Image (cartoon, grey):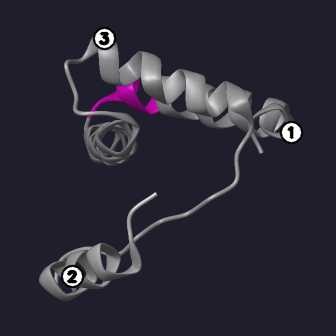
């Protein structure tokens, strides 16, 4: 864990562009993020979260113009809603 001074320095440096996201999730999600980071040559779980956000937003935008993308997005949404307790 970073020292309080290091945390304050990080917050001051990044206050306009970043905010810290601390969430409690199941080990499965941590493992999935680590796997995504490894498979995509990302710099850890934090970057994997950013990547997942980017991909989800991209798929949603693409779905506005492509039926197959819309179908896939809907399938992922339904599957997540069905199994969401596994991931929370």
Q: Which residue is mark 2?
A: 9
Quadrant for the C terminus, please: top right
Closer to the eye: label 3 or 2:
2
Quick check: 52 left or right of 81? left
First in sequence: mark 2 vs mark 1 = 2
Q: Which residue is mark 3?
A: 39
Position in image of residue 34 (x %, y %): 45, 24
Based on the displayed image, in which of its 4 quarters is residue 13 positioned? bottom left
The residue that appears at 82% across and 30% down in the rendered structure is: 83
Q: How far is the residue under mark 2 from the one under mark 1?
A: 37 Å
Position in image of residue 17 (x %, y %): 17, 77
Position in image of residue 4 (x %, y %): 40, 79
The residue that appears at 32% across and 33% down in the rendered structure is: 44
In the displayed structure, 2 sits above or below 74; it is below
In the displayed structure, 56 sits above or below 19; it is above
Q: Which residue is mark 1?
A: 85
Closer to the eye: label 1 or 3:
3
């Amino acid at each position: 864990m970073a020292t309080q001074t290091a945390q304050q320095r990080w917050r001051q440096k990044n206050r306009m562009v970043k905010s810290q996201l601390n969430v409690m999730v199941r080990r499965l999600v941590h493992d999935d993020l680590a796997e995504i980071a490894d498979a995509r040559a990302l710099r850890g779980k934090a970057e994997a979260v950013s990547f997942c956000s980017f991909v989800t937003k991209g798929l949603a935008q693409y779905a506005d113009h492509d039926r197959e993308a819309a179908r896939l997005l809907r399938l992922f949404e339904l599957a997540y809603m069905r199994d969401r307790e596994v991931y929370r």
